[in-house]
Image (cartoon, grey):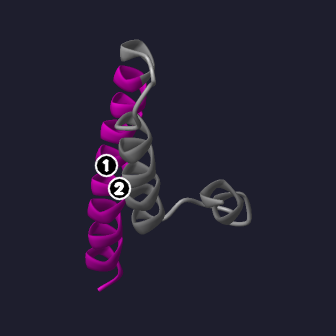
């Protein structure tokens, strides 16, 4: 399961955030789930995509500052 991978890490990476975002997005598209649940799952996916972007930006900044 995806959460087992995350629980073993001390810090989320951008790639892990993107993987989780994809997972939550796919869950939001399952047949038979309520509109409210789908809405929440999509919002979680969007938040994780945003976090992945911020982590990427932070990594670039940290590399630049180390020069």
What residue occupies the far front of the structure in this picture? 32
Residue at image point 45% right, 24% down: 33
Q: For this rendering, which residue is in front, 64 or 25?
A: 25
Quadrant of the image for the N terminus?
bottom right
Residue 62 on the magenta span: yes
What residue occupies the far bottom of the structure in this picture? 67
**For residue 4, what is the image quadrant?**
bottom right
Percent x, y for residue 38?
38, 25
Percent x, y for residue 61?
28, 67
Percent x, y for residue 21?
39, 49
Question: Above or below — where is 20 with respect to 36?
Answer: below
Q: Tell me if 37 is positioned left or right of 46 in this view.
A: right
Residue at image point 41% right, 68% down: 15
Residue at image point 31% right, 52% down: 54
- Region of the chain picked out in magenta, as a range: 38-67
Quadrant of the image for the C terminus?
bottom left
Q: Tell me if 41 is positioned left or right of 7 in this view.
A: left
Do tag 2 and tag 1 residues touch (Cβ < 8 Å)? yes
Percent x, y for residue 22?
37, 53
Q: Residues within 10 Å of mark 2 (few under 14, many from 20)?
A: many
Question: Above or below — where is 7 with respect to 36?
Answer: below
Q: Which residue is mark 2?
A: 52
Q: Tell me if 8 is positioned left or right of 53 in this view.
A: right
Q: Helix, strand, or loop for circle 1?
A: helix
Q: Which residue is mark 1?
A: 49
Question: Above or below — where is 51 with respect to 4?
Answer: above
Q: Helix, strand, or loop for circle 2?
A: helix
């Amino acid at each position: 399961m995806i959460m087992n991978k995350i629980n073993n890490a001390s810090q989320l990476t951008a790639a892990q955030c993107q993987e989780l975002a994809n997972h939550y997005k796919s869950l939001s598209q399952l047949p038979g789930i309520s509109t409210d649940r789908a809405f929440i799952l999509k919002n979680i996916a969007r938040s994780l995509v945003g976090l992945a972007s911020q982590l990427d930006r932070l990594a670039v900044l940290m590399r630049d500052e180390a020069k």
